[in-house]
């Protein structure tokens, strides 16, 4: 009986992803102690609520030099659907064609002002941004816990956590709490937030231009050489109003393209377990001053 219970609890721990979640955290802490990564562990299973829907954030990481947070979702995927493929969309919004902004969300309160603003911080324009996700079968035996839709489930969960935490941070700041916000040299208050999905899935990307497909059949052929494996990638996702916090970042005279970015588009890094160290030690995170803001924080 005891042996059967032991096997049962092992299966539950594995299938529900707790082993993966805390293994990821242990790896993150180890990398942080080496000094390669500026991201340290802050809290696990943090409860928030968004539009009356409760959610627990798997864990939160805090940057050691600025008030910037990673909101993390861990996804141990079904072995039979463990190939996640991402493709670029050739048309996203009107604007520069030299790549898309990598964005994170910003909340900001100017010194002496009662108003808390939301907006985006962005860094570089990159052509290495993907928009269309697919889950492909492999030869692994399925566990029956999850079907297709694991990417969407992961993204939905991490965005609920992101937006729930932002609402909590804003409400705390309104009550005078400094729990989430940091004072800059001009005594303005700010904090930034970025969602990240860590996964056991193998990540594949293709740079093919799907607009070159056959318009009569609606099909396209992609050469095998066009598909290659990566350790992590940037997934650009337009969150629905149901997933978004209740504070708008849209400015006066914003056009449709700007509204899409300011209120809905979010960058979600998707990171394979083997790429955790590479992702957390990337140059993106070591130079906070390189991030630019869509609102005036001077």
Image: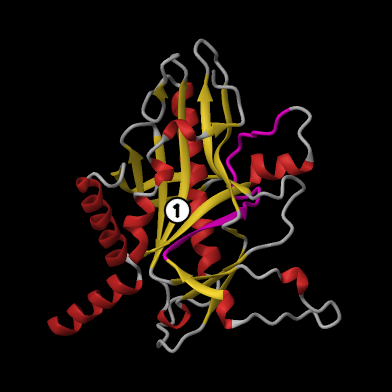
Q: Which residue is pictured at 84% across the width and 77% down the height? A: 215
Q: Position of residue 43 (x, y in %)?
A: 30, 44
Q: Nearer the viewer, residue 182 or 37?
A: 37
Magenta segment's dominant SS is loop
**Name of the residue lying farthest toward the top:** 112
Give the camera-side residue of 43 and 276: 276
- Relative to 118, 254 lies left or right: right
Residue in the picture at 45% in, 14% down: 186
- Residue 237 vertical placement versus 115 (above, below): below
> Where residue 246 sits in the image (x, y, percent)?
61, 37
Q: Is residue 59 above or below residue 117?
A: below
Q: Quadrant of the C terminus?
A: top right
Q: Residues within 10 Å of mark 1 (few under 14, many from 20)?
A: many
Tell me, what colour scheme is on the image?
secondary structure
Residue at position x 38%, y 54% in the image: 279
SS at mark 1 in the image: strand
- Residue assigned mark 1: 196
Q: Position of residue 176 (x, y in %)?
A: 42, 19
Q: Is residue 114 above or below residue 68?
A: above
Residue segment shown in magenta: 231-251
Q: Residue furthest left?
A: 2
Quarter of the image that includes the N terminus: bottom left
| 279 horizontally vs 222: left or right | left
**Residue 49 appearing in the image:** no
Residue 7 visible in the current orientation: yes
| Residue depicted at 71% across the width and 29% down the height | 251
| Residue 248 shown in magenta | yes
């Amino acid at each position: 009986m005891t042996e059967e219970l032991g096997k049962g609890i092992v299966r539950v721990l594995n299938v529900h992803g707790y082993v993966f979640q805390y293994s990821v955290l242990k790896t993150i802490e180890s990398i942080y102690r080496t000094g390669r990564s500026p991201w340290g562990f802050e809290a696990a299973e943090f409860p928030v609520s968004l539009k009356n829907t409760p959610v627990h954030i798997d864990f939160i990481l805090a940057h050691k030099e600025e008030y910037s947070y990673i909101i993390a979702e861990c996804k141990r995927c079904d072995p039979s659907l463990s190939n996640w493929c991402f493709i670029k969309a050739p048309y996203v919004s009107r604007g520069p064609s030299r790549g898309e902004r990598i964005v994170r969300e910003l909340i900001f309160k100017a010194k002496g002002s009662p108003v808390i603003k939301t907006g985006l911080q962005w860094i570089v324009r990159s052509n290495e941004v993907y928009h269309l996700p697919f889950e492909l079968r492999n030869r692994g035996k399925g566990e029956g816990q999850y079907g297709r839709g694991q990417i969407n489930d992961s993204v939905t969960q991490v965005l609920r956590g992101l937006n729930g935490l932002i609402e909590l941070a804003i409400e705390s700041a309104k009550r005078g709490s400094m729990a989430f916000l940091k004072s800059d040299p001009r005594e303005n208050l700010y904090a930034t937030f970025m969602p990240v999905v860590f996964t056991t899935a193998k990540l594949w990307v293709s740079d093919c231009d799907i607009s070159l497909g056959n318009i009569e059949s609606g099909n396209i052929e992609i050469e095998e050489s066009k598909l290659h494996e990566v350790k992590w990638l940037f997934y650009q996702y337009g969150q629905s109003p149901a997933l978004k916090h209740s504070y708008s970042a849209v400015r006066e005279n914003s056009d449709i393209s700007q509204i899409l970015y300011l209120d809905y588009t979010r960058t979600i890094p998707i990171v394979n377990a083997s790429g955790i160290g590479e992702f957390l030690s990337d140059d993106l995170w070591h130079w906070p001053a390189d991030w630019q803001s869509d609102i005036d924080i001077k």
